Amino acid sequence: MTVVDTMSSTEAAIAVDGRHVAHNYSPLPVVATSADGVWVTDVEGRRYLDCLAAYSAVNFGHRNPEITAVAHAQLDSLTLVSRAFHSDRLGPFCQALAELCGKDMVLPMNSGAEAVESGIKVARKWGTDVKGVPAGQSNIVVAHNNFHGRTTTIISFSDDETARRGFGPYTPGFRSVAFGDADALAAAIDDNTVAVLLEPIQGEAGIVVPPRDFLPRVRALCTERNVLMIADEIQSGLARTGRTFACDHFGVVPDIYLLGKALGGGVVPLSAVVADRDVLGVLHPGEHGSTFGGNPLAAAIGTTVVAMLRRGEFQSRSAELGDHLHARLRALIGSGVVAVRGMGLWAGVDIDPALGTGKQITVRLAERGVLVKDTHGSTLRFAPPLVITAAEIDWAIDQFAQVLADPGSHLSGTAL
Ligand SMILES: Cc1ncc(COP(=O)(O)O)c(C=O)c1O
């Protein structure tokens, strides 16, 4: 008998990953093989309630039937032409998404980081062509503890040392101020500032909601100083917080929306920069592009996602069930939970560090059939697909309460 023969399917799959998958993540020891709605099944047939939803890319549930039906149909007709030709899918998608955002135009891309990179390029080009900032002299104001992705330019304005160390030289042209401090932001803006780039609610930082007057003040400052307000709604947008955009809670409309994750329906990578013509119109042929950006398969799926968002039911579910989730989590304050933040079905939960690291708690939760992800040591993130029910939330929080009550215990009979 070889060593591999004695391994469980889970251990064998993790061993192959360990040898052949670059170690740029530290995943939970769960090997998914199928999923439906909010439930994920692993290679040994165990079921887990997904309370992460692929960092909000699966807002509409795993294999949402409305989305998979469109994807199947599109696979049978046309998948990719590049932007060298038109397709009959891209225009309708961009029109629908622009309308959802109350804007004129859409620049389709693939990953979230690409949307951020594209937004930065658009803002810089707008700065030179429209605002009149000398070429190469512009700056963009960002916030401490931001997370916008991990490309070279984006990590250049991150203050996460793990994301930065060893990856220099960094891209210049960014200045960072405290998130939520409108005075600091006002002081950072000068004549060469072309944009303020923010997550309206910081996701990876631990679901940090700014003071109520912050985003309205940023909006007013950007208008006064002729600076573009860019809202990175890649994680916070598309119904996650109980409104279509997190900005909606604050009565704010940015100049540029950056969207991704759930836009691809949990099926394909699809991201977008959405803005009015006086901003996105600065791009001309050859200045920016992507072979896969706006491909017909993604565009067909994205059109369906926009139609689903138009109905409002996912926003309502997130708002109503989010109240329930937050009430249940707040009831655990003092019983292992230190603080709860967030909006809608999106909660950052600080746990008492004495109970163990966030990662240890997520492993205990996975043993009990609940998938969540830690961030920054002692914070857990609850962001289930928006199709979750109140009873499923109750079950997940019951498991969480039991883990907090006895964080050291392992369930017998599980192979994790
Ligand atoms: C706010 C925000 N922006 C950008 C990104 C990057 O998206 P992607 O991983 O698709 O590149 C993320 C990913 O978590 C995010 O949360």
Image (tube, rainbow, N blue to C red):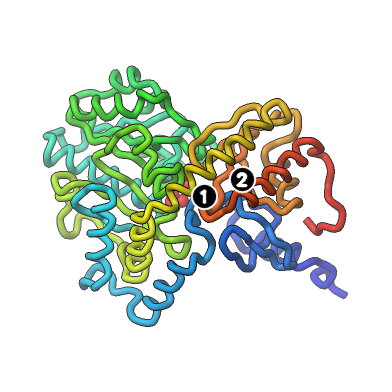
Q: Is residue 230 left or right of residue 54?
A: left
| In the depicted structure, whether residue 40 falls above or below residue 334 | below
Q: Say few, some or many: other residues with alpha carbon within 10 Å of mark 1 (under 14 / 14 to 19 / 20 or more).
A: many
Q: Amino acid at mark 2?
A: Lys
379 or 327, nearer to the observer: 327
| In the depicted structure, whether residue 88 falls above or below residue 367 | below
> Mark 1: which secondary structure?
helix
Q: Is residue 257 left or right of residue 406?
A: left
Q: Quadrant of residue 218?
A: top left
> Mark 2: which secondary structure?
strand
Residue 49 visible somewhere in the drawing: yes
**Upstream in the sequence, badge 1 or badge 2?**
1
Residue at the image position 71 percent from the left and 51 percent from the top: 366
* Mark 1 sits near ligand 1, with its Cβ under 8 Å away: yes
The label number, if any, that marks residue 227 in the structure image: none
| In the depicted structure, whether residue 187 falls above or below residue 381 | above
* Contact flag, marks 1 and 2 (Cβ < 8 Å): yes
The residue wearing badge 2 is 373
Residue 249 percent location from the top left of the image: 37, 35
The label number, if any, that marks residue 55 in the structure image: 1
Residue at the image position 31 percent from the left and 33 percent from the top: 251
Real-space Cα distance between discs 1 and 2? 9 Å
Q: Quadrant of residue 5?
A: bottom right
